[in-house]
Structure formats: structure tokens, C-alpha cells
Image (tube, rainbow, N blue to C red):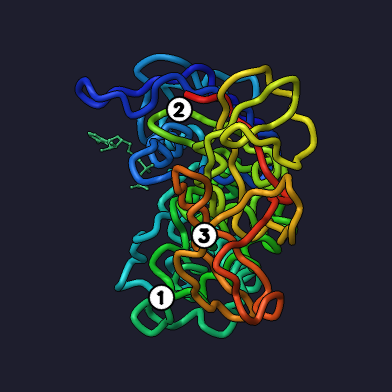
Amino acid sequence: MDIRVVDVRKDFDRYPALRGVSLDIRSGELIALLGPSGSGKTTLLRLIAGLEHPTSGMVFFGDEDASQKSVQERNVGFVFQSYALFKHLTVADNIAFGLKVRPRDKRPPGAAIRKRASELLDLVQLSGLEKRFPAQLSGGQRQRVALARALAIEPRVLLLDEPFGALDAKVRRELRQWLRELHDKTGHTTVFVTHDQEEALELADRVVVMSQGLIEQVGTPDEIYDSPNSPFVFSFIGEASELPVSVAGGQILFEGHPVGLSPARAGDGAARLFLRPNSVDLAGDRPDALRGTVASVRRSGGWRRINLLVGEAKHLVEIEVPADACHDLPDKIAFLPRYWQLFPAS
Ligand code: ATP
């Protein structure tokens, strides 16, 4: 099911939680809504679910205007971080719940419901646990029951709000992998909210980066990581250091000295050079390198993380070099970013 969000605004009292958001989600896609706390991810998810209605703008399910339709009418399945299972129901009854509470004329016969629950138990790899109660399951197992329950109604769309947020790192990683496989098997259009960059980049077909009620960028994980379109996305998606530079005829200058980076497409004037600590080469005695004084060094696995004070103005830049690249660290280090982006000075 294609979903189209068109120029949606959502105000709570007078507070604008979404300030004009447009997004096309293609049928069968796995989409991550990624952003810091308060950026509007959950509000956007709830608007797609039908739990909230837009102040202005529209939400389409296929060709149908769903903006004012209810959750049931939209036929969406959703799972929240703290979506409690029914404590007094077994795993099988929890999964079958959505089917059992359907109006009589839409409710499948008992045998069909039991069959569906058993297929779903298989799908979420919990066969054998159907008679257990939620209290007898691990956190990861509970979350899989919640997913099976959401899938039971054969939703047109699956919506997940921080589905693995409450779990420990190892279980989280396992469930991530599992959700990806489940998605590839069932092909549901799926939208999930996360504030975890790694989770979004690892799991999603496309990532929607949000900030302050607006979408900053939409792209594949590679596009988002390799071509962030703003300083916000660059810094939010991975570690970043920044230097103020200028551009003259395509040449990048730092404190007036040419820097050995490929010509910039930016126009002349002040600019912001962003680099990633883990994408830096040591530059020996190249005259066109950036240079910094070592302020501190930390060992991190096979790497050294070095804080450098760069240039006359002592800008703090972090770089990461293989621990064996320099045994006796000199006081001054010359380096060049391998991967970098220029943004206009604000
Ligand atoms: P988090 O990662 O912390 O869950 P989020 O990106 O999902 O954040 P939202 O929950 O969508 O953000 O909230 C966006 C903004 O809207 C926040 O400033 C929040 O306080 C506000 N907000 C959300 N729901 C309501 C509500 N029901 N009433 C008033 N303000 C709300």
C-alpha cells in the first residue's frame, strides 16, 4: 500500500509538532523515521496510523484520502515500545485478539483464527510457547508476540514506534536482523520510529531524518550517510568535526592556506568544512595538509582517538588513526579528511 503524506501540519494547542511534512512511502518499503527527541517522529507515525488527525494537509492510502479515517478503517497494525500484551491472555490468545474482537460479520470462524495464530507463531519463531502467559516470556519474545499480534489482522501497513527501545543491546541487534527478514518475507509496507542512527541505517530501505517538526532529508542509508544535505544531518547521522574555511575559485582555504582537497563546487566565500573522525588520513609533511596540536589521546580498540587543536584559532577536531600508525605520537599532526562535505556558512 502506497502512503502519501501531503504538506501535513499538526498543532497541539498552539505548539507545532509538525510544520509542513510531505512524504511518499512506496508499497512494500521499510521506512525509518529518525530524529532527536521531540522532532515529531511519533506524531507523524500516529498521523499515518489514524490515532491523530492533521491540523492541515492530507494523508493518502493509495488513491484514497484517509486523513479523517479511523485506525480500524485504515487497517493498520502497530507496535509501541511499551505496548503491553494482555497479561491474562496466553500468547496464542494475544495474537488472535485483533481477529476475535472484529464485528461478527467480519470475524473469521474459530478454526481459521486458531490456524492464523499458529502460522504467525511460526513466523515469529515462537512455536511451542502458545500456552505461555506474557510474564513467562523474555522481553524479546514479548516484542515478537506484539509484532505477531499486529500482523494477525493482515494490516495494509505495519507501524512500529521504537519497537526495540526497551531491550538490551544484544537482543535489539538480533530483533533488528529478524525484523528485516520478516519484512522481506511478508512484504508489508512498514514504518518504524527510532532515534538510533545505527538501527535506521542498518534496517531501513529509506531513512527519513526529522528535526523540529520538519523532514531534513529522505534517502537510502548510503545517500544519508554519504551525502548528508545539511550540517544537521551530517552531525546527527555520525560523528563529525567542523572547521570554518573559505573557497576561492574552487580552492578550499583554511586560515588563508590552500588545503589539499579536490576542488569544491561551492561558490566563493566563507564555508563550513565537515569531516568524520574515522575518515581521515595522516598527511606526513604535505604542505597543503591541515595541522593540529595534540590535546588528548584515547585508546579505543585498535584505534587512537586524538583531539587536535587546529590552526591559530585552535578549533577542536577529533581524528581516529590506527593504533599502530604512530607509536610515538608527535606533538603536531598533519592530516587530510578522506571524506568531507562543504556547507555554506550560516
Ligand atoms: P521522542 O523521540 O522523544 O518520542 P518524537 O520525535 O517522537 O520524540 P513527538 O512525540 O512527535 O516527538 O513530539 C513532537 C513535539 O510535539 C514534542 O515537542 C512534544 O512535546 C509535542 N507533543 C506531542 N504530542 C503532544 C500532545 N498530545 N500534546 C501536546 N504536545 C505534544
Q: Nearer the viewer, mark 3 or mark 2?
A: 3
Residue pictured at 66% horizontal, 46% vertical:
225
Amino acid on which disc 1 is placed: Thr
Asked if marks 3 and 2 touch (Cβ < 8 Å), the reply is: no
> Mark number for residue 90?
1
Q: Secondary structure at mark 3?
A: strand
Q: Secondary structure at mark 2?
A: strand
Amino acid on which disc 3 is placed: Thr
Q: Which residue is mark 3?
A: 293
**Residue 57: image location, x then y, percent:** 45, 15
Label 3 or label 2, whichever comes before in sequence order: 2
| 108 displayed left or right of 253 | left
Residues under labels 3 and 2: Cα distance? 39 Å
Mark 2 Cα within 10 Å, few/some/many (few <14, many 20+)?
many
Residue pictured at 46% horizontal, 52% vertical:
316
Mark 3 Cα within 10 Å, few/some/many (few <14, many 20+)?
some
Label 3 or label 1, whichever comes before in sequence order: 1
Asked if marks 3 and 1 touch (Cβ < 8 Å), the reply is: no
> Mark number for residue 214?
2
